[in-house]
Image (cartoon, rainbow, N blue to C red):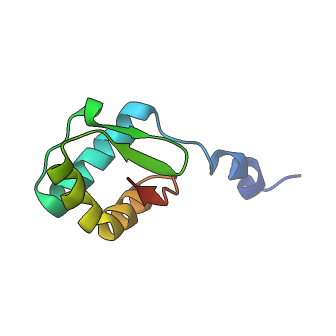
Amino acid sequence: MKGIQSLLSRYKKIKAPEKSRKDIFIKTVLANTGIELNYNEFKINKNTIHLKCHSVIREEIIQNKQSILNKYNQQTNDHVLDIF
C-alpha cells in the first residue's frame, strides 16, 4: 500500500492561477519598494517576469530584484530566476 506522501507528491508542483501569482508579485513589490503595480504592467512567464512599465519604476524594481525574487519564490511554487 502506498503511503500518503507518495500519493500527495504529484501535487507539489501545482502552480497557482495567474491572478493569484500576480497578486503576490504586486504585494511583494509594494512591500520592498513602495511601488504599486497594475496587472497590465508586467507578465509572468515560466522563469522570468517581464516588466512593461515606466523605465524609472522598472529600474527601482530591478535594483531590489534579489529581495523581491526571494520573497516571491518563498510564497509561491514558482522558481522565477529573473526580472527584466
Of 1 and 34, which appears nearest the observer? 34
Which percent across, then down, holds residue 28?
26, 55
Which percent across, then down, holds residue 18?
43, 33
* Residue beneath the point at 31% across and 47% down: 24
* Residue beneath the point at 17% across and 51% down: 57
The residue lying furthest to the left in this view is 34
The residue lying furthest to the front in this view is 55
Q: Is residue 38 above or below residue 34?
A: above
Q: How many numbered dots are placed on residues in this image? A: 0
Which percent across, then down, holds residue 45?
50, 41
The residue lying furthest to the right in this view is 1
Of 45 and 78, which appears nearest the observer? 45
Which percent across, then down, holds residue 21?
39, 41
* Residue beneath the point at 37% across and 32% down: 19
Q: Is residue 41 above or below residue 46?
A: above
> For residue 34, which quarter of the picture?
bottom left
Of 15 and 64, which appears nearest the observer? 64
